[in-house]
Image: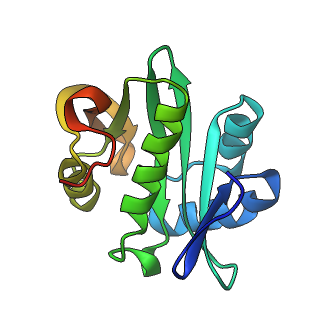
Amino acid sequence: MSGVLMTDRYLSQMTESDLDEVASIERSAYEFPWSRGNFEDSLRNGYYGICMRHVTGALIGYCVLMPVVDEMHLLNLCVAPEAQGAGAGLTLLRESVRIALANGLEGMLLEVRPSNHRAIRLYEQFGFITIGRRKNYYPARHHSREDAIVMRFSFAEEGADGAR
C-alpha cells in the first residue's frame, strides 16, 4: 500500500515516523491507551499498521493488524475523536479486510469493550458477529477490569466488502 487516495483522505503503511502522532491520538481517544512502545513493538514484529490521513497531512486514524494462522486479528482501530462519525472507521475496516484477503486469510477476529457502543455498532453493521467473551480482559477504573466481547468476521460467509 503506497498512499491509496480517497476524496479528501488517503491510506498509507504505518511507519516509525508516524508513531508520535499515533500515540497522541491514542491518548486522546482512550482512557487506557496503548503506549508508543506498543506500536513500535507491533511494527518491529511485522504486524500491519495502516494510517489514514487527511490530504492536509493530518492523521485521522489508524489500525494495527496481526496475522494469526488463518485469520487476521484486529488489535487496534482508532479514529481521532474530532474525526469520528465520518466513515473513517469503516474505511479502515475495509482496508483491513483487503489486506487479510490479499494474504489468503479466512476471517478477522477482534476484541472490543462492552462499554464501547459506537465501535460495537460499527463492527455489527460491517458484519462481525459476537462469538464469545474474555473475562477481565481490559483495565478499567478503580483498579478493576472490564470484559472483552470477542467478534469475528468470516470472509466466506459475509463476503469481503462488509457494511451490509
Which residue corresponds to the image point at 68% horizontal and 63% vertical from the top-left?
A: 3
The quarter of the displayed image where residue 110 is located: top left
**Extreme residue in the bottom direction:** 56
The quarter of the displayed image where residue 51 is located: bottom right
In the rendered image, residue 139, in percent from the top left (x then y), is placed at 40, 41
In the rendered image, residue 146, in percent from the top left (x then y), is placed at 29, 40
**Extreme residue in the top direction:** 69
Which residue corresponds to the image point at 47% horizontal and 59% vertical from the top-left?
A: 78
The quarter of the displayed image where residue 52 is located: bottom right
Q: Is residue 23 above or below residue 86?
A: above
Q: How many marks?
A: 0
**In this rendering, position of residue 32 left or right of residue 131:** right
Q: Is residue 145 visible?
A: no
Q: Between 86 and 80, which is closer to the camera in this rendering?
A: 86
Q: Between 30 and 85, which is closer to the camera in this rendering?
A: 85
Q: Please, which colouring scheme is shown?
A: rainbow
**In this rendering, position of residue 94 left or right of residue 55:** left
In the rendered image, residue 109, in percent from the top left (x then y), is placed at 36, 31
In the rendered image, residue 160, in percent from the top left (x then y), is placed at 33, 41
Q: Is residue 106 above or below residue 34?
A: above
Q: Between 30 and 65, which is closer to the camera in this rendering?
A: 65
Which residue corresponds to the image point at 38% horizontal and 42% vertical from the top-left?
A: 143
Which residue corresponds to the image point at 45% horizontal and 81% vertical from the top-left?
A: 82
Q: Is residue 53 visible?
A: yes
Q: Between 163 and 37, which is closer to the camera in this rendering?
A: 163
